[in-house]
Image: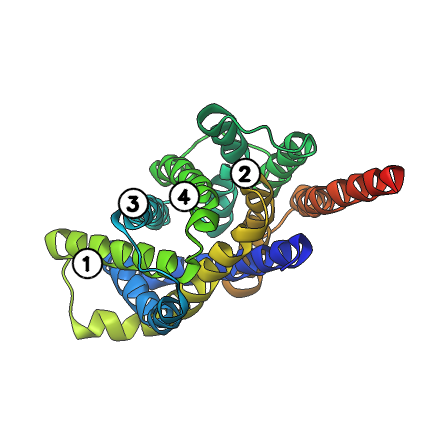
């Protein structure tokens, strides 16, 4: 798979997640946030199971403890991010949640430098800053009056950044993207259901009331989009992946307008344009530099 194809997969994942913000928000009219997390990732586990089984049959050797343990840590980061985001949606809007979640586009390069001692391509820093500015404008250009949900979503961005960096570190090394997907889904499903048992009531009426949202989040936002993320990140860097995945903020705002009647201001549309420009820079600049180097060496 080429880097362009990988980045397009990550862009598709961002679009699916953007629509998922709407499902996550409306579901909580019927069901608690932790049960929603548990059920969506249980369904996602069923999506990933046959893919992981097929991958295991073709693998040269079985997974060992040194591979499984990092996958579990990735699952814990995924659950922590999903939990803080989902609970945050109780007291923030879909558009604000998309914006604040998108802060990981800035956090990922910082974590990459601090913990992995890897210097990303120079275009990542201006592109990350542009994406952050675009997300900021998409939110209305203000950070005043942050709600408890906003603060939880900022914490969510930290966990998403950790998950992106860990996937970038371990998925290529293991060569088992479907196993990683399955394990992180199972860990998140167990965490959500355990918290739901302790904190939230549940009955069939609640499940039926949120069934459409659970199906979308389980099959697409979780099952498909996270698998696209894992596959795409095998062929690109974590900072580049963060740029493309941050498009979820753009899509969250657009679906919020279409499905929930939320309003995007002219400032917000300017933010959309800046996010798109950042993604183009990440794609075009490294490709152009590689061609120039190849031309000089020829």
Q: Nearer the viewer, residue 202 or 41?
A: 41
Q: Earlier in the sequence, mark 4 or mark 2?
A: 2
Q: Are marks 3 and 4 in contact (CB under 8 Å)?
A: no
Left or right of residue 10: residue 298: right
Give the Cα separation between the discs numbered 2 and 3.
Answer: 28 Å
N-terminal-most mark, 1 or 3: 3
User: Which element is circle 4 on?
Assistant: helix
| Front position among marks 1 and 3 | 3
- Which residue is more in the foreground, 251 or 186? 186
Q: Tell me which corner region of the image, top left, top right, bottom left or bottom right, holds residue 126.
A: top right
Q: Nearer the viewer, mark 2 or mark 3?
A: 3
Tell me which numbered mark, 3 or 4, is placed earlier along the sequence: 3
Q: Residue at x 62, y 53 (%)?
A: 7
What crowding class fits label 4: few (fewer than 14 Cα within 10 Å), some (14-19), or many (20 or more)? many
Cβ–Cβ under 8 Å for marks 1 and 3: no
Which mark is on residue 105? Answer: 2
User: Circle 4 is placed at which residue position?
Assistant: 163
Kindly identify which residue carries mark 1: 193
The residue nearer to you, when weighing 179 against 174, is 174
Residue 256 % position (x, y): 53, 58
Q: What residue is shown with label 3?
A: 66
Label 4 – label 2 distance at C-alpha: 12 Å
Percent position of residue 291, x then y: 82, 44
Whole-angstrom CA distance, mark 1 to mark 3, is 27 Å
């Amino acid at each position: 798979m080429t880097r362009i194809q990988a980045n397009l997969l990550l862009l598709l994942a961002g679009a699916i997640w953007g629509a998922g913000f709407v499902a996550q928000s409306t579901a909580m009219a019927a069901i608690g946030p932790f049960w929603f997390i548990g059920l969506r990732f249980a369904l996602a586990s069923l999506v990933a199971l046959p893919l992981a089984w097929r991958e295991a049959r073709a693998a040269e050797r079985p997974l060992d403890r040194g591979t499984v343990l990092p996958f579990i840590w990735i699952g814990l980061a995924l659950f922590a991010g999903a939990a803080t985001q989902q609970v945050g949606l109780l007291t923030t809007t879909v558009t604000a949640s998309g914006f604040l979640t998108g802060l990981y586009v800035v956090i990922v390069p910082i974590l990459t430098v601090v913990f992995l001692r890897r210097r990303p391509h120079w275009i990542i820093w201006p592109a990350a800053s542009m994406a952050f500015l675009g997300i900021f404008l998409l939110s209305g250009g203000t950070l005043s009056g942050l709600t408890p949900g906003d603060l939880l979503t900022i914490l969510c961005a930290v966990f998403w950044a950790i998950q992106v960096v860990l996937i970038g570190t371990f998925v290529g090394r293991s060569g088992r993207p479907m196993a990683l997907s399955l394990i992180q889904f199972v860990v998140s499903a167990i965490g959500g259901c355990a918290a739901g048992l302790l904190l939230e009531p549940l009955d069939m009426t609640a499940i039926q009331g949120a069934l459409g949202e659970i199906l979308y989040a389980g099959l697409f936002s979780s099952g498909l989009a996270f698998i696209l993320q894992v596959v795409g990140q095998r062929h690109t860097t974590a900072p580049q992946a963060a740029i493309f995945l941050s498009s979820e903020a753009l899509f969250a705002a657009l679906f919020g307008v279409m499905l929930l009647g939320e309003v995007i201001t002219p400032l917000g549309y300017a933010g959309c344009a800046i996010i798109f420009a950042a993604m183009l820079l990440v794609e075009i600049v490294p490709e152009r530099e590689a061609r120039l180097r190849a031309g000089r060496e020829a």
